[in-house]
Image: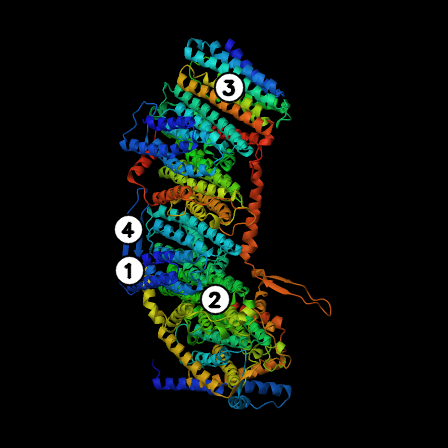
């Protein structure tokens, strides 16, 4: 540990603050790009901050049918993603907390969030929310599989199960690992869209309950719980974005430059999502598994290439 | 040693006083089994914390059969779930299966015997002793499965279990014959080097795998398990699922401890079987409507996870990677304990639910979290743990196995580590779907039947054992460092040489810290979210139409439908409904059912056809004396021909 | 020489037995065969041993008088006297019997005989008679004919036993006599029971117990 | 030589024929049984090697088999009074006399030291048991007795021919009368091989028919099915043991003359075939007594298999003889009780026995578990070790086939038994006044406990006896 403790602490602090404070920017960016491409003015970039502030002051409605589980969904999402954010490296510095197996914990924290979100949805007794949660759990296994196969491909060289090591692998820079890394990137990009409920898997802006996945699960939330839901969604964008950026960002060797690259990367990613959402249309529900399967296969091939 | 024997005797006799009293038999039995658990756990803790182990040679009988017991860390480790679950089960049984039940006395007596036989089995160090305990346990369990023998389903389940376990025992005969042939003794011990790779060694491995696989419910040998677990009283199911099927794992561990040089393909076989059991187990669980059958299929899934760990450990051992070995075996062993705790917990709470609602059908339940908050919390802890979600114990053991797979990736030229990894990921996600369904449909939403609406909380004596098991799940999940030294000793006993300590391979304190952080954040946010203004007496969002009725809720079938119908090639779901054709259709019904592909798809039709074929041979015994005499002549003729040739 | 012709006669009765359809006739033939066999030890010059003489006399008495008596008594009680359609037709029976006799000759040929055996024909004849008895047992439908078959089977053993009767009288005589007396006696009793219980002696009545 | 072992039961049989009152006759049974068992134990205790050159003598092999039969008889005799009390309208004169003479003839057979005498005993045994099968005196039992008698007589005739062939083999070798077994075994090298081989085959078919190995067993299901359970027990445990002993004597000769490998191969093949054939008929066998009959066929196959394996397996086969006899006794008697209670013994009619005749049903279930090799009952010891030895060095398939067949048999038997024992008794079936009483269940419990005891511990003298019996069958030229 040549790195002075102070600098390291500063980096950690920066990462935590970035996650806490800046993630609501990302949905704003995406919406802005979409609006621009559609020729509209669109909501301001900071719209989500306004929404969160407004919702914090509003009364929350709790249906008669619900139990304490109803609140657990939004709460757990935010808590789990926050903890997960400590495990993923932003830029190319090691994550604030890193140890063997943090990659697994990372994924399982998302699993936890999903579990409680689904239960919160079922807690309302609404058939819409049951439908949404059924869809959620149907697509999630494929997404998880794609991520883990990507891990397998990345760990083929190091055998490490820590995100900080996995994402520090040579990646695109190295000729031999170029093709696998591209495939993993493709697979993870699909997962990124799916996990964050973006087009072509899900449409965050839809208003028809029957076609929703994630949005329909949180249909009954209002007030502060809804604020948590929205905040959690933006956190997920940021944290999963970091995972993808780890694969593609060039290594500068200078921490502050890395930070800059990371920030730029997050913005580009958001812009990319906006572009994708503008130029593609929603997939039919039955096609979603096939789309995710492409992601799984991409990751699987990445591993298989390394095996031969 | 005396503590172990005290535990054994107390458990064996725990049902006896109840035979002679009209009331309080359950309490006495629970007290004795709890005392037995205290004694046995003390002994296990002593050995696992480095205390001296003991061995005992029983006197040989004139026919050469002898017996031996050895209380080593393996035995001590496996003894823990045995005693914990039997004690919890017996306390639970006081009110769950009270004295006025037809079979209450028999049930208590048998539960004690089952505990004693299983406790004997874990310490058996001789093939005869092992077989006696093994078969004793199986037969007693058969009587327990068939407790409610007035019901045809229970009889069928019991029979299926009985024949499966006996076939397993016979395979064990053969496997022991081959190993005893190699060592020249019935005593457990190291097999000569090279035996494992020989043809006889492979045959023995195959037979062991059949036998232990049948016991453990490894797919495709799991076919007996769902119906047996569903038919048995819930505290027996909890013991069977938590402990009894693990004796198959115990057998595999014992086998691996005798083999100095397991071939590479053994590990591969374990991984392949583990992946198959895990994925198919959970996929089949998804389509179940019967709560206990659903849990039973999850036992198959968890056996798959354990096998993945054993397989990776064996791969690591064969190739000389001690870290992979320690992580694989360690994870598998910890999962044995963990699964005992959370599956025991789940079965106990499922039993409470079934008793309160009078049905095991998920689609008749709903909204029970309000009526049975304690049971709901217990089930939630179990579900949380079994999905392997942090910060509970299921996550820790799965993490070990994941790490073994990760560490095996760089050097392995085989696809096994990656398969293990992918399988674990898939299993985890599917298990999550399944338990979201189970908890959501049973406890959340609105009651789907009058019985569910009228349900009442289980009595305290049933909730206490659930609480104990839930605490166990939490404890291991939050402080896995406590279990690590015991696992290290277990591994050393198993492989005969010191393995790298697990604590050096996994940063266990980080897990504890992060779990704490997660809980703290959760509590903080929850407080914040609750502090705002709220309105509580409102209906669920109904799109502005008439209020939704409970019948409109998603059911267990509809929840799982999209997943189950995505895998028709593996699951063979059966759907019965009339397609709507006209513009103004009549009311129609939709039923989906997920039969077991091995039992209902292959096994029963095959046996049916075989039996039919054999029945056709009956014409050989058609009652005509001349024909019978002809058999005598023909036999004589053929034998003479044999002599001439 | 005389004794060889007696043996040949026995084998002829075998053929006669398998072609006869009337039950009474079958009994008569069996009686005839019994008497021939009774005479055989005398023809072989074994009559000098009083115990062999006694055995032969016993055999003749049982086979020539006692057994026919029992059979006829049973026969009187039932109507039909003809063997209806045996499992193996009469023509096929003859062929079988011939084949069996040939096989007996072959088997006997492959077994070495003690040096100085005076009547080597006894072995094949015994086996052939045994075979005939077996044939009657498996091909006939009437209980009575079957018992006759058993009697013929016994005759085959008796023929073979004559090879040993001089050297091992005890073994042979005990066996032969016991078989004759007790076996046939008990069978006669059972036959009587059958004819009372079923009013018939068709064995198809006796095929209720089956799987 | 213990004359009284033969004469006592025969005298009792004569007395039974003479006694006018049925109740007094019945009391003769346990009395004779106890005296016989005591006498036998005394004779065995006196021990000493067999005096060579005698017609009768108690060698270890015969002693072991006779001990098994005597114990079995004692249990059956203890049970019979209670059974006969349930059938007051049946005259028991012939029944008791035949029952007693069975014991006398079995004693004769076990002590006979001469092939002819063995044969004579076997033949009379057949005849003495025929009236037992006809006890019910109806058309069905008559048919069973008829088949039993005819098939048995044909078999026994072949055995006589086989005995004569062996005598001729001795004659060729220059061995004169009397052909004591001990003498034949000593001079076995002189026997003419072709005659000996054919003689063995004939005896295998002959005594095999009496034992009831497939496909010579066809009388068995009918005979066991139509007799009272107690006769079934006596036949399945006692008479088959006698026939097996007769065969073993010949097998001893074969081994001593160096023809062991030939005969052993044959025995293994016949044994496995018997098990397989029995299995075919046990599948979906709804009739309890027939099921037990086929189980008996299967266990005869196991005995042959064990003897055929040779070496230490012979001892376990002999042990299995005892184990099988005792457990068969439990099974037949409990099925008999259930039959009494339901007045039926087929499946759709007999269900839920555990609720009507709880003790008998439990005994049936435990007996079934015991016979299928569940530890710690005695059959486990033999079946496990036979499986182990069947997979001993140099061979794998006999053991595997043996185990596969055991598994099949378990599957087939358990299907019927679980249906019979558990569930609810059918309402359509009227209940007879029969209830489990001390007299009809205690003997069974004793037999089961004995089986359990044998499984856990074999007294040293018995073990010695077993070992020297096995040695007699494993003599080398």
Judged from the image, the secondary structure of the residue bearing numbered disc 1 is: helix
What is the x, y in percent for residue A234? 51, 83
From this view, report whether residue A33 is shown above or below residue B94. Answer: below
Do the residues indicated by labels 2 and 4 lie within the same chain of the protein? yes
Residue pointed to by mark 3: C155
Residue pointed to by mark 1: B3
Assess whether mark 1 and mark 2 are in contact (beta carbons under 8 angstroms): no
Can residue B256 be seen by looking at this rendering? no
Mark 2 to mark 4 CA distance (whole Å): 42 Å
Along the line of sight, the residue nearer the viewer: D15 or B516: D15
Q: Which of marks 2 and 3 is in front?
A: 2
From this view, report whether residue B233 is shown above or below residue D168. Answer: below
Which label is found at residue B350? 2
Which numbered disc, 2 or 4, marks the residue that appears first in the sequence?
4
Mark 2 to mark 1 CA distance (whole Å): 33 Å
Judged from the image, the secondary structure of the residue bearing numbered disc 3 is: helix
């Amino acid at each position: 540990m040549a790195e002075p403790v102070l600098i390291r602490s500063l980096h950690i602090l920066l990462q935590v603050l970035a996650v806490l404070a800046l993630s609501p920017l990302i949905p704003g960016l995406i919406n802005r790009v979409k609006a621009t491409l559609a020729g509209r003015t669109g909501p301001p970039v900071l719209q989500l901050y306004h929404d969160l502030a407004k919702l914090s002051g509003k009364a929350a409605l709790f249906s008669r049918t619900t139990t304490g589980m109803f609140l657990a969904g939004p709460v757990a999402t935010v808590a789990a993603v926050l903890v997960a954010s400590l495990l993923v490296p932003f830029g190319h510095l090691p994550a604030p907390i890193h140890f063997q197996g943090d990659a697994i914990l990372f994924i399982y924290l998302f699993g936890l969030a999903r579990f409680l979100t689904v239960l919160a949805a079922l807690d309302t007794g609404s058939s819409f929310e049951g439908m949404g949660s059924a869809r959620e759990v149907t697509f999630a296994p494929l997404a998880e599989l794609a991520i883990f196969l990507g891990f397998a491909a990345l760990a083929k060289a190091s055998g490490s199960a820590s995100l900080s090591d996995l994402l520090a692998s040579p990646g695109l820079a190295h000729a031999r690992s170029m093709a696998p890394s591209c495939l993993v990137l493709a697979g993870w990009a699909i997962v990124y869209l799916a996990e964050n409920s973006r087009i072509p898997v899900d449409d965050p802006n839809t208003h028809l309950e029957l076609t929703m996945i994630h949005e329909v699960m949180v249909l009954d939330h209002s007030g502060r719980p809804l604020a948590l839901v929205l905040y959690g969604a933006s956190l997920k964008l940021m944290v999963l974005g970091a995972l993808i950026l780890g694969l593609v960002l060039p290594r500068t060797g200078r921490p502050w430059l890395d930070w800059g690259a990371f920030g730029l990367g997050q913005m580009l990613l958001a812009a990319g999502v906006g572009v994708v959402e503008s130029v593609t249309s929603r997939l039919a529900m039955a096609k979603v598994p096939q789309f995710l399967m492409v992601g799984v296969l991409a990751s699987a091939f990445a591993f298989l290439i390394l095996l031969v | 040693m005396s503590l172990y024997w005290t535990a054994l005797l107390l458990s064996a006799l725990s049902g006896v006083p109840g035979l002679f009293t009209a009331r309080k038999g359950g309490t006495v039995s629970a007290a004795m089994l709890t005392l037995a658990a205290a004694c046995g756990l003390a002994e296990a803790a002593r050995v696992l914390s480095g205390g001296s182990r003991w061995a005992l040679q029983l006197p040989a009988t004139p026919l050469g059969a002898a017996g031996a017991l050895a209380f080593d860390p393996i035995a001590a480790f496996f003894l823990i779930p045995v005693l914990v679950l039997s004690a919890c089960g017996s306390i639970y049984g006081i009110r769950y299966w009270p004295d006025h039940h037809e079979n209450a006395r028999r049930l208590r007596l048998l539960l004690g015997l089952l505990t004693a036989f299983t406790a004997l089995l874990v310490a058996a160090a001789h093939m005869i002793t092992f077989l006696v305990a093994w078969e004793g346990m199986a037969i007693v369990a058969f009587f327990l499965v068939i407790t409610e023998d007035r019901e045809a389903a229970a009889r069928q389940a019991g029979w299926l279990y009985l024949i499966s376990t006996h076939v397993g025992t016979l395979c064990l005969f053969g496997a022991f014959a081959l190993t005893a042939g190699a060592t020249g003794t019935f005593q457990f011990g190291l097999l000569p080097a090279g035996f494992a790779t020989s043809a006889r060694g492979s045959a023995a491995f195959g037979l062991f795998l059949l036998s232990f696989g049948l016991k453990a419910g490894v797919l495709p040998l799991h076919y007996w398990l769902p119906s047996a677990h569903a038919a048995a009283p819930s505290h027996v199911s909890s013991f069977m699922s938590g402990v009894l099927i693990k004796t198959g794992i115990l057998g595999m561990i014992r086998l691996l401890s005798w083999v100095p040089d397991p071939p590479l393909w053994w590990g591969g076989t374990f991984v392949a079987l583990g992946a198959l059991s895990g994925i198919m187990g959970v996929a089949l669980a998804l389509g179940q409507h019967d709560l206990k059958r659903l849990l039973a299929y999850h036992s198959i899934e968890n056996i798959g996870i354990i096998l993945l760990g054993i397989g990776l450990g064996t791969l690591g051992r064969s190739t000389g990677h001690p870290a992979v070995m320690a992580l694989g075996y360690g994870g598998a062993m910890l999962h044995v304990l963990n699964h005992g705790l959370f599956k025991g917990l789940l079965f106990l709470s499922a039993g409470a639910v079934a008793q309160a609602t009078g049905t095991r059908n998920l689609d008749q339940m709903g909204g029970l979290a309000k009526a049975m908050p304690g049971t709901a919390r217990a089930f939630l802890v179990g579900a949380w743990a079994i999905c392997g979600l942090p910060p509970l114990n299921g996550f820790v053991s799965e993490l070990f196995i994941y790490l073994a797979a990760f560490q095996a990736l760089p050097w392995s030229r085989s696809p096994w580590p990656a398969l293990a990894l992918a399988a674990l990921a898939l299993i985890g996600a599917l298990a999550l779907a399944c338990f979201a369904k189970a908890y959501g449909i049973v406890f959340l939403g609105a009651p789907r039947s009058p019985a569910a609406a009228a349900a009442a909380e289980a009595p305290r004596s049933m909730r206490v054992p659930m609480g104990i098991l839930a605490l166990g799940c939490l404890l291991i999940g939050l402080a896995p460092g406590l279990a690590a030294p015991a696992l290290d000793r277990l591994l050393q006993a198993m492989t005969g040489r010191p393995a790298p300590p697990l604590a050096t391979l996994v940063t266990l304190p980080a897990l504890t810290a992060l779990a704490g952080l997660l809980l703290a954040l959760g509590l903080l946010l929850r407080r914040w979210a609750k502090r705002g203004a709220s309105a509580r007496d409102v209906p669920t969002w109904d799109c502005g139409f008439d209020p939704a009725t409970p019948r409109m809720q998603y059911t267990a079938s509809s929840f799982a439908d999209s997943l189950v119908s995505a895998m028709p090639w593996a699951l063979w779901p059966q759907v019965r409904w009339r397609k709507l054709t006209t513009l103004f259709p009549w009311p129609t019904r939709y039923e989906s059912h997920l039969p077991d592909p091995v039992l209902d798809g292959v096994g029963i039709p095959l046996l049916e056809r075989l039996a039919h074929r054999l029945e056709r041979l009956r014409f050989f015994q058609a009652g005509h004396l001349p024909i019978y005499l002809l058999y005598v002549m023909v036999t004589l003729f053929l034998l003479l021909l044999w002599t001439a040739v | 020489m005389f004794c060889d012709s007696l043996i040949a006669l026995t084998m002829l009765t075998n053929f006669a037995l398998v072609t006869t359809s009337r039950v009474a006739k079958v009994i008569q033939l069996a009686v005839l065969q019994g008497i021939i066999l009774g005479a055989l030890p005398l023809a072989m010059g074994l009559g000098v041993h009083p115990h062999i003489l006694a055995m032969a006399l016993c055999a003749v008495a049982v086979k020539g008088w006692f057994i026919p008596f029992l059979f006829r008594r049973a026969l009187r009680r039932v109507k039909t006297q003809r063997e209806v359609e045996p499992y193996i037709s009469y023509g096929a029976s003859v062929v079988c019997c011939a084949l069996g006799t040939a096989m007996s000759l072959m088997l006997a040929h492959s077994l070495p005989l003690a040096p100085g055996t005076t009547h080597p024909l006894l072995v094949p004849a015994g086996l052939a008679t045994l075979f005939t008895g077996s044939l009657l047992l498996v091909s006939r439908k009437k209980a009575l004919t079957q018992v006759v078959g058993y009697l013929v089977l016994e005759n085959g053993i008796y023929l073979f036993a004559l090879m040993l009767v001089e050297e091992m009288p005890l073994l042979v005589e005990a066996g032969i006599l016991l078989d004759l007396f007790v076996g046939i006696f008990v069978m006669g009793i059972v036959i009587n029971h059958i004819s009372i219980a079923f009013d018939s002696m068709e064995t198809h009545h006796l095929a209720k117990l089956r799987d | 030589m213990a004359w009284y072992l033969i004469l006592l039961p025969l005298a009792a049989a004569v007395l039974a024929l003479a006694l006018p009152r049925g109740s007094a006759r019945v009391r003769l049974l346990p009395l004779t049984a106890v005296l016989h068992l005591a006498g036998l134990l005394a004779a065995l205790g006196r021990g000493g090697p067999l005096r060579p050159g005698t017609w009768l003598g108690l060698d270890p092999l015969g002693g072991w088999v006779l001990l098994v039969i005597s114990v079995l008889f004692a249990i059956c005799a203890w049970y019979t009074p209670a059974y006969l009390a349930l059938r007051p309208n049946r005259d028991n004169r012939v029944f008791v006399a035949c029952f007693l003479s069975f014991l006398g003839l079995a004693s004769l057979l076990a002590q006979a030291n001469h092939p002819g005498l063995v044969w004579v005993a076997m033949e009379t045994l057949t005849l003495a048991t025929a009236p037992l099968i006809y006890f019910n005196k109806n058309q069905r039992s008559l048919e069973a007795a008829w088949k039993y008698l005819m098939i048995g007589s044909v078999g026994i005739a072949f055995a006589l021919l086989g005995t004569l062939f062996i005598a001729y083999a001795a004659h060729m070798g220059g061995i004169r009368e009397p052909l004591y077994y001990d003498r034949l075994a000593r001079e076995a090298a002189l026997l003419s091989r072709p005659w000996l081989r054919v003689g063995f085959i004939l005896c295998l078919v002959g005594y095999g028919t009496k034992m009831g190995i497939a496909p010579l067993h066809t009388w068995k299901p009918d005979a066991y099915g139509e007799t009272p359970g107690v006769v079934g027990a006596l036949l399945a445990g006692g008479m088959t043991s006698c026939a097996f002993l007769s065969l073993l004597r010949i097998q001893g000769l074969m081994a001593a003359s160096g023809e062991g490998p030939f005969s052993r191969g044959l025995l293994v093949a016949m044994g496995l075939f018997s098990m397989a054939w029995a299995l075919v008929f046990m599948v979906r066998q709804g009739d309890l007594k027939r099921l037990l009959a086929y189980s008996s066929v299967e266990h005869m196959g196991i005995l042959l298999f064990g003897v055929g394996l040779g070496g230490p397996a012979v001892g376990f086969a002999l042990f299995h003889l005892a184990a099988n006899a005792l457990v068969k006794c439990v099974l037949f008697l409990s099925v008999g009780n259930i039959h009494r209670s339901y007045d039926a013994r087929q499946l759709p009619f007999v269900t839920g026995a555990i609720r009507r005749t709880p003790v008998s049903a439990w005994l049936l279930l435990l007996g079934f578990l015991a016979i299928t090799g569940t530890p710690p009952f005695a059959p486990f010891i033999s079946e496990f070790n036979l499986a182990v030895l069947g997979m001993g060095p140099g061979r794998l398939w006999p053991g595997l086939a043996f185990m596969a067949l055991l598994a099949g048999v378990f599957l087939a038997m358990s299907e019927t038994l679980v249906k019979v024992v558990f569930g609810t008794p059918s309402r359509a079936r009227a209940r007879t006044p029969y209830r489990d009483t001390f007299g009809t269940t205690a003997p069974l419990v004793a037999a089961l406990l004995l089986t359990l005891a044998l499984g856990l511990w074999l007294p040293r003298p018995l073990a010695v006896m077993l070992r020297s019996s096995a040695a007699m069958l494993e003599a080398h030229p």
